[in-house]
Image (cartoon, rainbow, N blue to C red):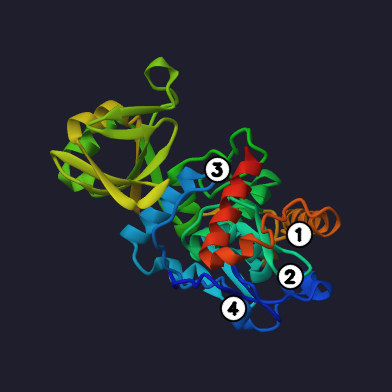
Amino acid sequence: MIEKTANKQFSDVSVKIGDRESVDNQNYEQSIFSKTDDKAYSIDCDGEIDATKQGQIGDCYLLSAVNAIEKNRPGFLKDVIKDNGDTIDVTFKGVKDKDGNFATYSINKADLELLDSENMMYPIYDEDGYMRTAININGEYSKGDDDMLALEVAYEALRNDIGGGLVEDKYGNKEELPEDVSGNVLTGGQINEAYTHITGEGASWNFVNSVAGEEKLNNPQQRHSIIGFSTPDHAQGDKAYVEIEGIKLPMQHAYTVTKMDNNSVSFVNPHDSSKELTLSMESFKKVAQRITYRQEGYDKNSTLETSGAKKVDLSDKTQAIKEKIKEAQEELNNENPYNIISEKEEDKGFFGNLISKIVEFFKDLF
């Protein structure tokens, strides 16, 4: 991952929380949504995955698969994700179009920036150029790494295409998407499916308490192929998580395995992949329902009914965000409900004013 700066550079204004530079409101929308050169973007992809935190979408299986690829096939994602300056191309090595080419999706950086949860608090200025509040414009996708964000957006487009006409893989198996309960096609899935779509390498799963599952966990020659696991749908008493050895594990959730031996299992939760957790093998078998493993030397490709690289259409999402920002700006200009800095308060200085803004903003939320 390329380290990102907190300051977003636009065509004619530098925007950050607490910035008191004067803004020409007449050109405000144009300066926010129009980029003049490649360096203006805060989105940078380098084909490497750093620590991330899952967003509101239920795509834990995808994040876990990507983290497994980064661990088990270092450098592989550099051939999957290409930063072209104005666009990001994501190529799925396990999906081909009807002409036999790998399925590739192109994403505009300007669109991706608006979906970036890293910048979900968007500043709103008054006519004098003072930042009066910040609105929450996004949070669906993961935060922490631009490559992961690009993969999420591209995989969402792929799953839309799968739902619209995936023929079958070369083994005659048709794929079915789970029922969408959140309004996003990314919600719900299996680590092995995402792993295979991205890499082209076969992957499958076994129940932990099955004969095949026990053999993989107990056999060192097979254990190294395990890349992830998932927890069952419900914990005791219908709790959303189970706590064991001092670790809280969400139910109906996917995880990436980082290390495993006879005595213990180490793993990361996509809610925060910067923290490695470890359970004894005994406890692991109590809480894990399924283990996912790589099928080395077993290539698998699915075929779409379309051909050629596809541009990802994010117009509906980006337009909704732009409208949200525009409405907040108009409210400020017309009614000034966010004027949380009085003339007396301006004497508090930068940090005093910033704290006041944050306090008032969260008061409005509740």
User: Which is more toward the observer, 268 or 339?
Assistant: 339
Q: In this view, does 198 lie above or below 26?
A: above
Quarter of the image that includes the N terminus? bottom left
The answer to whether 332 appears left or right of 199 in the picture is right
Q: Name the residue under label 4.
A: 84
Up-down: is 261 above or below 44?
above
Quickly name the residue at label 2.
33
State which quadrant residue 121 falls in. bottom right
Residue 32's quadrant in the figure?
A: bottom right
Q: Position of residue 355 (x, y in %)?
A: 53, 56
- Depth check: give the residue in front, 154 or 343: 343
Q: Residue 295, position in %: x, y?
A: 35, 49
Image position of 257 (left or right of 188): left
Element class at badge 4: loop
Whether 271 is drawn above or below 303: the answer is: above
Q: What amino acid type is highlighted by mark number 1?
A: Lys
Q: Is residue 324 visible?
A: yes
Q: Residue 12 versus residue 79: which sits nearer the camera?
A: 12
Pinpoint residue 198: horizontal percent, then vertical percent: 49, 57
Q: Give the residue type that dot 3 points to.
A: Gly
In this figure, which residue is indicated by the disc labeled 1? 322
Amino acid type of the residue that numbered disc 2 sits on in the rendered structure: Phe
